[in-house]
Image: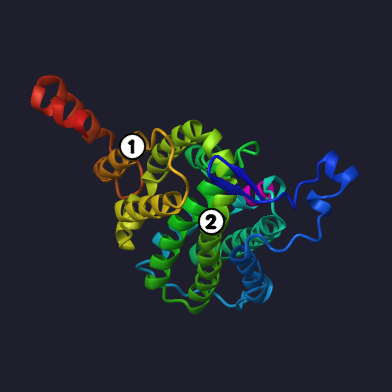
């Protein structure tokens, strides 16, 4: 084990470098004991919990979801669906960039599980609505690329997939399953949720392995995470009313995600500018609910922007310093 500024870095048992080909080690190391026992346990649990999409439920049966909630459920699942496919790519990238075979094997397994989630949701959503799937909107496409994928930054991808993204998605899946009535919908969501819980646990177990990369790129990662948060709020504006209908409070979901992110990072050595980073995170936590409330304020029931109200408020702001202050504060 090599030490990197107070952090014990695991021995390389996963990389396929030229040196490992000629001298052994890395990918060809089969003598080093497990370095991340709890991470390996999660990998083995995934094998024991395996489920197959084609036999997961009775796909030939119609979905009879409660009409009161069906469209809202479909809208939320349709929003998460392209994220599952992006996570297939992200987990695949991560599996090629980590240093231990425990992490390499686990993320290869997670890539398969994300593919199953995408396949299941792609089958399920049209059965709920009776319509073909809609193509993801531009902001959603940006969220699931810019905010998830960077094949040169393993710490960014692992943090945003396993520490942030999985935590957000799992809270939403749980709330949808609480409202859903159709047994096949509930069964699929329960299976996905079980996997997501394991992916969250994997983030806690494997993120410390990429601490050196996190330390080196921390300023850029913080900047990209801030931009991703803004993208998430913007990309989800059409979901304001489906979330309200399903009693999903995005501000609460985001707050729990921030707490989880802080909990994972608190186990790592502090950075010299840790006080500044904590202050930024606290400001972000306090400001996010207001941003979400204002998105709700200017969004109609059909998910479109209420242009008339926006123009009226802008007209008030031009004529009234107080209204302008309120708008800028928002």
Q: Which residues are magenta?
A: 90-94
Residue 299: x %, y % from top left: 30, 43
The foreground one among 206 and 141 is 206
Tag 1's secondary structure? helix
Residue 45: x %, y % from top left: 62, 72
Residue 15: x %, y % from top left: 76, 47
Horizontal side of 291 relative to 153 (left or right) equals left
Up-down relation of residue 323 to residue 160 (above or below): above
Horizontal side of 296 relative to 108 (left or right) equals left
Magenta-drawn stretch, dominant element (helix, strand or loop): helix
> What residue is rendered at 35% in x and 42% in y?
304
Numbered circle sitting on residue 306? none
Cα gap from disc 2 to disc 1, whole angstroms: 24 Å
Residue 125 appears in the picture as rendered = no
The foreground one among 269 and 83 is 269
Up-down relation of residue 153 to residue 206 (above or below): above
Q: Which of the 4 image quarters holds residue 213?
A: top right
The foreground one among 213 and 5 is 5
Tag 2's secondary structure? helix
Among numbered discs 2 and 1, the one appearing first in the sequence: 2
Q: Residue furthest right?
A: 22
Exactly how many numbered labels are in the figure?
2
> What residue is rendered at 59% in x and 62% in y?
117
Residue 307: x %, y % from top left: 28, 34
> Closer to the camera: disc 2 or disc 1?
1
Which residue bears the numbered disc 2?
Answer: 203
Q: Which of the 4 image quarters holds residue 188?
A: bottom right
Which residue bears the numbered disc 1?
Answer: 275
Residue 183 appears in the picture as rendered = yes
- Quarter of the image for the C terminus: give it: top left
Q: How is the image coloured?
A: rainbow
How packed mark 1 is, by other alpha carbons closer than 10 Å (few <14, some 14-19, many 20 or more), is: few
């Amino acid at each position: 084990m090599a030490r990197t500024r107070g952090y014990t870095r695991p021995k390389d048992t996963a990389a396929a470098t030229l040196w490992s080909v000629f001298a052994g080690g890395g990918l060809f190391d089969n003598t080093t004991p497990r370095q991340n026992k709890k991470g390996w346990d999660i990998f083995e649990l995934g094998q024991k919990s395996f489920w197959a999409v084609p036999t997961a439920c009775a796909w030939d049966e119609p979905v009879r979801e409660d009409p009161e909630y069906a469209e809202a459920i479909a809208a939320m699942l349709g929003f998460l669906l392209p994220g599952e496919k992006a996570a297939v790519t992200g987990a695949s990238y991560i599996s090629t960039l980590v240093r231990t075979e425990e992490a390499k094997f686990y993320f290869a397994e997670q890539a398969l599980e994300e593919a199953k989630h995408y396949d299941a949701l792609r089958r399920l959503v049209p059965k709920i609505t009776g319509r073909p799937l809609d193509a993801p909107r531009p902001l959603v496409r940006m969220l699931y690329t810019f905010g998830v994928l960077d094949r040169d930054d393993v710490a960014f991808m692992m943090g945003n997939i396993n520490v942030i993204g999985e935590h957000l998605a799992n809270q939403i899946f749980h709330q949808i399953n609480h409202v859903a009535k159709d047994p096949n919908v509930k069964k699929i969501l329960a299976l996905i949720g079980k996997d997501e819980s394991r992916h969250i646990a994997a983030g806690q177990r494997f993120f410390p392995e990429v601490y050196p990369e996190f330390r080196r790129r921390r300023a850029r990662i913080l900047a990209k995470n801030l931009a991703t948060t803004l993208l998430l709020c913007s990309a989800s504006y059409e979901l304001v009313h489906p979330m309200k209908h399903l009693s999903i409070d995005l501000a609460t979901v985001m707050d729990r995600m921030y707490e989880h992110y802080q909990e994972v990072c608190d186990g790592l050595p502090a950075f010299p500018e840790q006080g500044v980073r904590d202050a930024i995170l606290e400001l972000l936590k306090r400001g996010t609910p207001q941003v979400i409330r204002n998105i709700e304020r200017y969004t109609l029931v059909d998910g479109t922007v209420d242009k008339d109200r926006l123009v009226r408020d802008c007209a008030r702001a031009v004529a009234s310093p107080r209204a302008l202050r309120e708008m800028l504060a928002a």
